[in-house]
Image: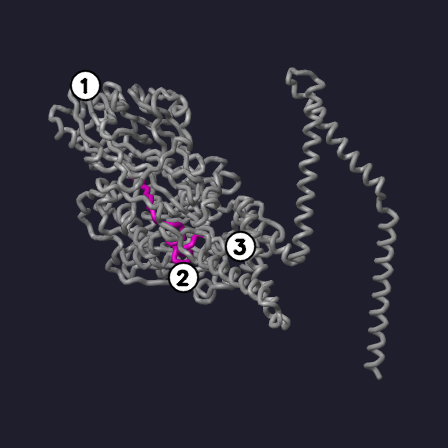
């Protein structure tokens, strides 16, 4: 009885709800019918809007001032308004017609899918709208054929259909399946390496191998491993119950700006903490021995926060710990990106957290009973960072020397660690600017690695930080950069891997040119280990490999390496930053002159997509005509006392940084070519068999003696490097641009070689440096950082 009564009550309630709904709908329909404007009102509204546009365009026409007459100007404006109405109305009509046709044939679901594909390709992948529309329509048509064909073929009446219909349906299915197969095959295709540049045969000559053991091989120390952290991590046991050493959270609120609302709440829910209690978590690899051992912190960059990045440097931890370094892979995943919301401009927070880790290590080293008591060499510290982490280690090294936070002086700093080395892997640059200025670095050893096929940080932004490193205290510092042609962004971290973007974007990346992951990480092992052995262990045997990568060819995978180097002994003659006068040198009293040059200009050496490098250089081009063989040259005359003041001698090096430009020299006298120093004058470079550029370097003494040597005697000029990041050319140009990125290579020419070429030449009497373009018929080079250094430091 009770059940029946309940059922009746429910039925009455449902009936009451339905009656209320019907009354509401009827009321809305009545209101609409009463208030809906009639045909006459709608026509009047249309005329009113059109009239307003015509009046506005007529007024704008009156401002043309074509000198014909005011009525003519007004008429022009009126015609523009009429054409605008006609064109836009026609376009809207076509769009409405297409939408109706789509709804008729595809229904709401298919039409929605088409728009979703278009928006996905256009907004998410940033395809050109034409390509996005083409792909969207293509996918919808193919899948419509497939779905429609299956629906027809599976119907019971299909068996009795005419043969013609069966053939048509089966053909539709076959075409759709073939198109799907082609699409999936293309997505699975690794791409092409047909663009890869190979150095000409003459450029493969190698230098005498370095007399030192391969630093990528394990050392003699047994390796211990542990983790430290809050002990309360919800997602990782190594930072939860399994921590060996517990650390206290820190308040990073001043460094996490503008992060509030639902995003902050969602991230706090996921992690269990917010910026006011960030944990200090780290994975440690350490040598089993008495110590003390240098301390190296490595920090990852931005990645999906739930795919933890810090385990990806275990290969470096195992190697470096075996060679007598303590390596800590710092966990900053809670600062990384996520669909739950990104923390904006957080690189200063990443840097500050690194310094908080160093505070922890300083405390452990001074605390009796701690397992690291007196085992940490706090006078020899290095910071290593990848991607945003590569920028943050430079920020940390700059913060380390400050007493106040540049963006809020109420926040005091008390760090003062002995950070001797900074390594950046494909770093970002400018994501954070202290006090609105680029990050300065002073009196620290610096190394930057960049992959030529890095599709994430595709610009060599680390080159900007390289240029900002200054040596001012006359200690034995150096900086180096290594550009690795076939390396990508992610393979320096085993978690990130071969694709620099997650699916589905990764399906569009061109992966075939890339080095194998183990090969790429071997490069990191060689350079990182050698750099740390040099800067923290004081092993000078490895320093020459940063000056010339050919010394260690046997240790490295086969690809093109372009390197730069500078140490405390370097004295600048000209870096083209001082003024707008192309005839003056950076050092006072010098004069720069060009003769018979087809190109001579100073400008910023832009990165790809014309992004500024914040680095000026001189562009020099020549074209030797057979009928009038005038030899082009570029001369730098030094002030009379400079060579003596700098004590140039047999141990001195003439240094300059140089790259081949991706443009051709114009023919003098042909104005249209002289004016066309842009993409129109670009020519294909780096092709197999192309003659490498070469020229003669002349050193002239005050007594008139001239020592002459070809540049190729010392090293080849690297070719212009071509990249191909994606499998779609249209996407390639939109995302990465079509112009190659100039990469400067260091050249160090011992003055001793010029003395051998002409015994009369005395470096102390050097008056003129001259580049004579007599060995290649034509070319354009980028020249920078001309000066002198010492072959052996300490003199």
Q: Does residue 598 appear to the left or right of 726 in the view shown?
A: left
Question: How far across and how far down the image is residue 68, in percent?
Answer: 66, 16
Task: Give the residue furthest to the bottom.
Answer: 1
Residue 361 is covered by the magenta coloring: no
Q: Which residues are magenta?
A: 477-500
Q: Based on the displayed image, in which of its 4 quarters is residue 628 positioned? A: top left
Asked if residue 446 is positioned above or below residue 168 in the image, the reply reads above
Q: Does residue 267 appear to the left or right of 191 in the view shown?
A: right
The CA distance from mark 3 to mark 2 is: 25 Å
Q: Does residue 567 appear to the left or right of 48 in the view shown?
A: left
Q: Which residue is mark 1?
A: 702
Asked if residue 519 is positioned above or below residue 202 in the image, the reply reads below
Task: Give the residue furthest to the front.
Answer: 163
Disc 2 packing (10 Å; few <14; some 14–19; many ≥20): many
Disc 1 packing (10 Å; few <14; some 14–19; many ≥20): some
Q: Residue at x 30, y 51 (%)?
A: 523
Q: Which residue is mark 2?
A: 227
Q: Which residue is mark 3?
A: 338
The CA distance from mark 1 to mark 3 is: 66 Å
The CA distance from mark 2 to mark 1 is: 65 Å
Mark 2 or 1: in front is: 1
* Labels 2 and 1: the sequence-earlier one: 2
């Amino acid at each position: 009885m009770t059940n029946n009564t309940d059922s009746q009550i429910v039925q009455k309630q449902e009936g009451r709800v339905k009656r209320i709904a019907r009354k509401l709908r009827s009321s809305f329909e009545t209101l609409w019918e009463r208030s809906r404007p009639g045909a006459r009102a709608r026509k009047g509204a249309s005329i009113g809007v059109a009239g307003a546009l015509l009046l506005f365009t007529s007024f704008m026409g009156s401002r043309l001032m074509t000198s014909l007459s005011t009525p003519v100007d007004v008429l022009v404006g009126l015609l523009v308004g009429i054409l605008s109405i006609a064109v836009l109305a026609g376009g809207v009509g076509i769009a409405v017609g297409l939408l109706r046709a789509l709804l008729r044939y595809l229904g709401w679901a298919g039409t929605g899918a088409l728009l979703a594909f278009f928006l996905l390709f256009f907004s998410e992948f940033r395809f050109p709208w034409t390509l996005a529309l083409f792909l969207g329509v293509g996918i919808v048509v193919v899948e419509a054929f497939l779905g429609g064909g299956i629906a027809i073929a599976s119907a019971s009446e299909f068996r009795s259909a005419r043969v013609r219909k069966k053939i048509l349906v089966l053909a539709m299915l076959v075409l759709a399946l073939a198109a799907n197969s082609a699409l999936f095959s293309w997505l699975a295709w690794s791409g092409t390496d047909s663009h890869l540049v190979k150095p000409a045969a003459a450029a493969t000559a190698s230098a005498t191998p370095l007399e030192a053991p391969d630093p990528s091989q394990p050392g003699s120390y047994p390796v211990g491993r542990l983790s430290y952290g809050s002990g309360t991590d919800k997602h990782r046991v190594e930072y939860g119950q399994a921590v060996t050493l517990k650390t206290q959270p820190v308040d990073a609120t001043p460094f996490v700006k503008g992060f509030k609302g639902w995003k902050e709440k969602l991230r706090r829910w996921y992690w269990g903490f917010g910026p006011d209690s960030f944990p200090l978590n780290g994975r440690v690899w350490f040598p089993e021995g008495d110590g003390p051992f240098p301390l190296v912190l490595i920090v990852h960059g931005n990645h999906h926060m739930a795919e933890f990045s810090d385990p990806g440097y275990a290969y470096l931890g195992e190697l470096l710990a075996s060679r007598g370094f303590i390596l800590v892979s710092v966990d900053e995943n809670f600062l990384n990106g996520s669909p739950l919301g990104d923390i904006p401009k957080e690189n200063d927070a990443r840097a500050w957290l690194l310094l908080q880790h160093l505070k922890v290590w300083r405390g452990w080293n001074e605390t009796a009973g701690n397992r690291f008591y007196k085992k940490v060499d706090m006078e020899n510290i290095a910071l290593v960072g990848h991607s945003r982490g590569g920028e943050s280690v430079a920020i940390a090294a700059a913060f380390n020397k400050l007493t106040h936070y540049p963006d809020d002086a109420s926040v005091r700093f008390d760090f003062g660690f002995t950070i001797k080395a900074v390594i950046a892997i494909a770093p970002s640059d400018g994501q954070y600017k202290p006090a609105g200025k680029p990050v300065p670095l002073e009196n620290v050893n610096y190394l930057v690695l960049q992959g030529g096929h890095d599709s994430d940080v595709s610009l060599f932004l680390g080159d900007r930080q390289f240029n900002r490193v200054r040596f001012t205290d006359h200690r034995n510092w150096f900086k180096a950069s290594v550009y690795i042609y076939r390396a990508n962004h992610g393979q320096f971290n085993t978690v990130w891997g071969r694709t620099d973007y997650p699916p589905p974007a990764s399906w569009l990346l061109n992966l075939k040119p890339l080095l194998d992951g183990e090969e790429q990480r071997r490069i990191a092992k060689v350079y990182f280990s050698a750099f740390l052995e040099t800067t923290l262990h004081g092993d000078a045997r490895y320093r020459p490999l940063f000056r010339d990568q050919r010394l260690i060819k046997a240790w490295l995978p086969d690809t093109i390496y372009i390197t730069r180097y500078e140490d405390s002994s370097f004295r600048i003659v000209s870096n083209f930053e001082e003024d707008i006068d192309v005839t003056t040198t950076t050092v006072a009293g010098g004069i720069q002159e060009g003769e018979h040059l087809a190109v001579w200009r100073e400008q910023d050496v832009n990165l790809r997509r014309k992004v500024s490098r914040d680095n000026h250089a001189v562009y020099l081009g020549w074209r030797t005509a057979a009928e009038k063989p005038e030899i082009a040259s570029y001369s730098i005359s030094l002030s009379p006392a400079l060579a003596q003041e700098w004590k140039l001698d047999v141990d001195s090096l003439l240094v300059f940084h140089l790259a081949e430009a991706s443009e051709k020299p114009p023919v003098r006298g042909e104005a249209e070519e002289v004016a066309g120093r842009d993409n129109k004058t670009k020519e294909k470079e780096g092709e197999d068999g192309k003659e490498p550029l070469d020229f003669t370097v002349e050193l002239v003494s005050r007594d008139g003696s001239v020592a002459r040597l070809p540049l190729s005697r010392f090293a080849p000029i690297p070719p212009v490097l071509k990249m191909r990041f994606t499998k779609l050319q249209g996407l390639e140009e939109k995302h990465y641009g079509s112009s190659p990125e100039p990469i400067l290579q260091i050249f160090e020419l011992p003055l001793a070689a010029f003395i051998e070429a002409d015994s009369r030449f005395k470096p102390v009497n050097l008056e003129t440096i001259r580049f004579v373009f007599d060995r290649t018929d034509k070319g354009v080079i980028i020249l920078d950082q001309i000066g002198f250094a010492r072959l052996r430091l300490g003199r």
